[in-house]
């Protein structure tokens, strides 16, 4: 439906521009230009010719008009990176006009991102929508959180008035980090990784009506399926990279993508046929364990797996606990009923001094 709306809009605009010398048309979203090139190549050639005459001007510099509040920071930067890269390659120039007339709020780091991307002027309309706190300016200077300043303009007039996106953003950044480590450590034969197919879905999902949830049921279903497929593929690729990075190690690999060491208590889902060869662990049930570990920054630890021995082939190692207090650390306390060999109660402890 959206592609046909783009076709109808451009067909009417091109007719208008050919029959009149004065009008100038602006259109945002590199994705719309990309769709036009792919599905309507003749229309796209007319668009390029009108662009050369400055009659059709791309604005925004973004892949789509994304939300800029709840969109993850890396995804927001990639929105402009992919958009500006497309416009420069296809039309010869980057956009210099920022364009977000319908965004649900504005991030304070946007002036810096726009200015570093070649945007010289920002255009919007949304501040006029507040019926209680009237925005007093039409032309103003927007100063960002880092003191970057960008001239801004409010259009006068009336306009027609979650979680998967964050997970995908995190997985993409993790994937690219591991790809870099694989190249540095010569554990990959791939000359150049290309994750654009994943990023393009993520960037489209950051469209302000999609990421905020103000979409139709059909659109929601589409993105739910797309995100599910992308998350599964990213998880698989990340696992393969980690295995290659650790020399095809067979066991549990815990990776820390942060730049500093992390010590934490981890809950691990286990295959009931295996056990971890690790001392500091607590078995919650047949498929879950707790362990406390320190993982180095930008590094990993590996824990071997062993097949679980059959009870009738080996001497039982279970110990009957007579005391009520079983295990206590600064993070948690576990109690057991006298005479039991399982863990019926779990109490988390909060350190109020930190």
Image (cartoon, grey):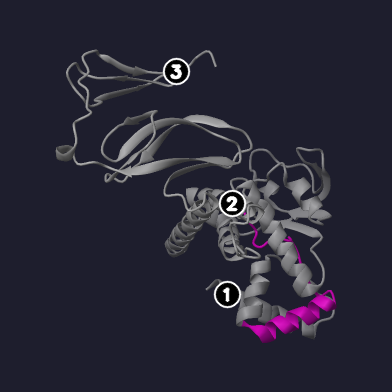
Res 182 quadrant in image: bottom right
- Tell me the CA gap for discs 3 and 2: 33 Å
Q: Position of residue 148 (x, y in %)?
A: 82, 42
* Residue 105 in view of the camera: yes
Q: Position of residue 305 (x, y in %)?
A: 37, 43
Q: Are marks 3 and 2 in contact (CB under 8 Å)?
A: no
Circle 2 or circle 1, nearest the eye = 2
* Residue 162 in view of the camera: no
Query: Of 173 and 264, which appears nearest the observer?
Result: 264
Residue at the limit of the structure toward the left, as seen here:
312
| Vertical relation: 32 (above or below) 287 | below
- Tell me the CA gap for discs 3 and 1: 58 Å
Circle 3 or circle 2, nearest the eye = 2
Q: Using a 10 Å C-alpha cutoff, classify the residue at mark 2 as few (fewer than 14 neighbours), some (14 to 19) or many (20 or more).
A: many
| Vertical relation: 16 (above or below) 284 | below
* Point 46% across, 49% down: residue: 249
* Point 29% across, 41% down: residue: 287
* Residue marked by disc 3: 330
* Point 44% across, 18% down: residue: 330
Identify the image quadrant of the C terminus: top right
Circle 3 or circle 1, nearest the eye = 3
Q: Secondary structure at mark 3?
A: loop
Q: Earlier in the sequence, mark 3 or mark 1?
A: 1
Q: Secondary structure at mark 1?
A: helix
Q: Earlier in the sequence, mark 3 or mark 2?
A: 2
What range of the chain is rendered magenta?
Answer: 40-66
Q: Position of residue 263 (x, y in %)?
A: 52, 29
Q: Earlier in the sequence, mark 2 or mark 1?
A: 1
* Residue marked by disc 2: 178
215 relative to 287 in the view: left or right: right
Question: Which mark is drawn over residue 3?
Answer: 1
Q: Using a 10 Å C-alpha cutoff, classify the residue at mark 3 as few (fewer than 14 neighbours), some (14 to 19) or many (20 or more).
A: few
């Amino acid at each position: 439906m959206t592609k046909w709306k783009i076709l109808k809009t451009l067909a009417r605009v091109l007719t208008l521009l050919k029959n009149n010398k004065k009008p100038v048309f602006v259109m945002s979203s590199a994705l719309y230009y990309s769709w036009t090139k792919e599905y309507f190549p003749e229309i796209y050639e007319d668009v390029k010719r009108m662009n050369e005459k400055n009659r059709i001007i791309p604005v925004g510099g973004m892949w789509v008009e994304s939300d800029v509040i709840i969109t993850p920071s890396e995804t927001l930067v990639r929105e402009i990176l992919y958009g500006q890269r497309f416009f420069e390659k296809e039309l010869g120039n980057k956009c210099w006009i920022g364009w977000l007339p319908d965004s649900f709020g504005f991030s304070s780091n946007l002036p810096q991102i726009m200015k570093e991307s070649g945007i010289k002027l920002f255009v919007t309309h949304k501040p006029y929508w507040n019926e209680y706190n009237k925005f007093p300016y039409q032309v103003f200077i927007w100063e960002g959180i880092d003191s970057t300043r960008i001239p801004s303009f409010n259009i006068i007039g009336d306009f027609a008035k979650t979680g998967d996106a964050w997970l995908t953003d995190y997985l993409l950044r993790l994937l690219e980090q591991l790809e870099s480590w694989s190249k540095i450590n010569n554990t990959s034969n791939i000359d150049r990784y290309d994750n654009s197919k994943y990023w393009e879905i993520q960037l489209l999902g950051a469209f302000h009506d999609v990421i905020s949830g103000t979409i139709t049921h059909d659109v929601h279903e589409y993105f739910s399926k797309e995100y599910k497929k992308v998350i599964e593929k990213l998880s698989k690729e990340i696992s393969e990279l980690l295995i290659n990075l650790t020399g095809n190690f067979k066991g549990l690999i815990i990776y820390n993508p942060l730049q500093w060491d992390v010590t934490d208590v981890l809950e691990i889902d286990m295959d009931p046929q295996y056990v971890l060869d690790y001392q500091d662990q607590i078995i919650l049930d047949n498929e879950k364990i707790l362990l406390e570990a320190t993982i180095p920054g930008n590094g990993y630890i590996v824990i071997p797996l062993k097949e679980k021995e059959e009870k009738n082939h080996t001497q039982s190692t279970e110990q009957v606990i007579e005391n009520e207090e079983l295990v206590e650390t600064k993070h948690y306390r576990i109690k057991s009923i006298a005479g039991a060999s399982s863990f019926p109660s779990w109490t988390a402890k909060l350190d109020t001094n930190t």
